Image (tube, grey):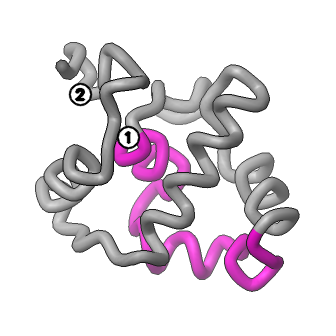
Amino acid sequence: MMNSKNHLEKLASWNETIAKKNALKEDIYLTNEHIEILMEARLFFNDYGFSPSIRPLCKYIARDLGSHKASGIYLNKLFPGSPAREISFLAGLPKPKNCI
């Protein structure tokens, strides 16, 4: 179930099928690389209790997946526009606080 801002109301109801469906609405075809980043965002949320903005997310990704996957260029290629906002939306998380 989605709220008025198109984010999931219950974080536990998220799955890859929902992510893929929502990604298609954003003209994004999810690959394993996308899913890997979405899973990192969900892990971040589980660890810290909030959706990450881009800098904390990049540090978290670098720690777990390596710096090459934590670059803004890499993330913007996968999630064009506003990567933090797209990632949180597709990962079934609330919008990061500093995203417009």
The image shows residue 95 at horizontal and vertical percentages of 47, 29
The secondary element bearing badge 1 is classed as helix
Disc with the residue nearer the chain's start (2 vs 1): 2
Predominant SS of the magenta segment = helix
Q: Residue 28: x and y, percent? A: 24, 68
Magenta region includes residue 3: no
Q: Would residue 72 appear left or right of 27 to someone viewing this image? A: right
**Region of the chain picked out in magenta, as a range:** 65-91
Give the side of residue 31 with respect to residue 33, left or right. left
The residue lying at 21 percent from left, 51 percent from top is 17
Question: For mark 2, does the 10 Å Cα neighbourhood hold few (<14), some (14 to 19), or many (20 or more) residues?
Answer: few
Which residue is rendered at x = 41% and y = 62% of the image?
81
Q: Which mark is residue 6?
A: 2
Q: For mark 1, what is the residue?
A: 89
Taking the spot 53% from the left edge, 66% from the top edge, the residue there is 36
Q: 2 above or below 21?
A: above
